[in-house]
Amino acid sequence: MKELIHKLNNNPKYSRLFQWGKMISITGSAQMVVQATGLLTGILIIRMLPTKEYAYYTIANTMLATMTLLADGGISSGVMAKGGKIWKDKKQLGQVLATGLDLRKKFAVFSLIIAVPILIYLLNHQGASLWTIVFIVAALIPSFFAALSDSLLEIIPRLHQDIKMLQGNQLLVSVLRLILSVASVVFFPFTFVALIANGIPRMYGNSRLKIITYQFAEKEMAPDPQIRADILKIVKRTLPGAIYYSLSGQITIWLMSVMGTTSSIAQVGALGRLSMVLTIFTVMFSTLITPRFARFEDDRKLLISNFLKIFCGLVILCFFIVGIVYAFPNQLLWILGKGYGNLSTALVLSVTGSCLSLISGSVFTLSTSRGWIINPLFTIPLNVLALVLGILFLDISTLNGILLLNIFMAAAQIAMLIVFFFIKALKSNN
């Protein structure tokens, strides 16, 4: 047996297969634990927080995602695209990272100015008291500042495929979040307590992530003007779309926050918690697939053939996931508690929309990893058109109607991104 394994390892074809199997097993097993821990944390929060407090928690988390997206504005795509070309040069990689972090700090101010007033309005609209709003906004800040750097810091070890250390850090953060959430929310069932319990472990994880990252990049490098200009070229094409997607990407919560009740917001948030299991595939994709795709040579045939393999794999995966949910909706809803047991159809629609978003996001990151950014003058009007058509033909006053709108918009997004990818790939050199 040992002799057979040795021969297979020396065979280039099988050696590569074994390498991929090892990488997938490390990433997959770690992410299964990370996401299981995250799901358990989310379920406990759903069960421990009163419905009104969980509605506030859903709004706050949605706004955190929006703030993070606005603060990025395409910077991470620029760092990935730039870093993929010089990933073996420790000094240049340090300059790219330092420039990206410097830009993100500046963008954070813009994000706060835009997002905080909206958060205050939505919380007030749902009946939150003044002190509740103040505590929630203050508690959201630690998580926001942690999010400013962690997605950029993770790019460097991903480019070098140092998966083990990266996954270990994510696992530690998720376990600490679970422990802190249970220890605090049980005794203090308030939204701001749950947000603080989420932010502190993330800040600690960032301190460890810096140690991992600076093994591959020079530390304390000054931002480089030329690198900044290169990244900003991508940002200028990405930022308008980021602003749009920060709104449209959470269209369910926005519409429910304005038109719905705290109960309907809590239902959407609870269903979203089950769909968060898909994050395991998003993380595996961004850890294993995207960095390798960024490192490919500018070869038309190579890029298209690998894209088709990746896309078909994603479609098969999503069909399997939706099939499981369709077959066992009641068992899955039991996890959320008695208050959500009548949402079988909504669960299937929610997971379907999340699967389509997984495909859309994956296709988008493949393009941006090559530095290909679709012009927002095309994307925004097309997406607005899809949104308007969806609102005209669907009953968005109901939960199922809102979820169908999500599915329609995600499908339109996938079609647009595929067309764009092939246009850019066909222009690549042979």
Image: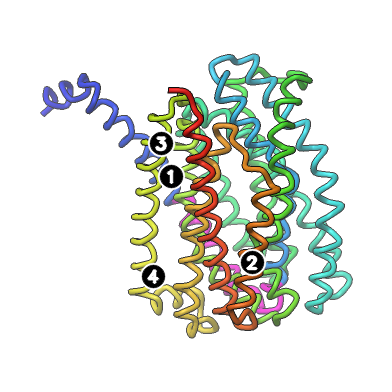
Q: Earlier in the sequence, mark 1 or mark 2?
A: 1
Q: Earlier in the sequence, mark 2 or mark 4?
A: 4
Mark 3–mark 1 CB contact (< 8 Å) = no
Mark 4, other Cα within 10 Å: few <14 / some 14–19 / many ≥20: many
Q: Nearer the viewer, residue 391 or 335?
A: 391
Mark 1–mark 2 CB contact (< 8 Å) = no
Q: Earlier in the sequence, mark 3 or mark 4?
A: 3
Quadrant of residue 367 within the rendered picture: top right
Q: Give the labeled residue for mark 1.
A: 30
Q: Secondary structure at mark 1?
A: helix
Mark nearest the camera among 1 and 2 is 2
Q: Is residue 120 magenta?
A: no
Give the CA separation, mark 3 to mark 1: 30 Å
Residue at left offset 55%, top offset 32%? 370
Q: Which mark is residue 327?
A: none
Q: Which mark is residue 304?
A: 3
Residue at left offset 84%, top offset 54%? 114
Mark nearest the camera among 3 and 4 is 3
Q: Earlier in the sequence, mark 3 or mark 1?
A: 1
Q: Is residue 168 visible?
A: no
Q: Secondary structure at mark 4?
A: helix
Q: Give the labeled residue for mark 4.
A: 325
Task: Report the amino acid beneath label 3.
Answer: Ile
Q: Earlier in the sequence, mark 4 or mark 1?
A: 1
Task: Report the amino acid beneath label 4.
Answer: Val
Residue at left offset 53%, top offset 35%? 424
Q: Earlier in the sequence, mark 3 or mark 2?
A: 3
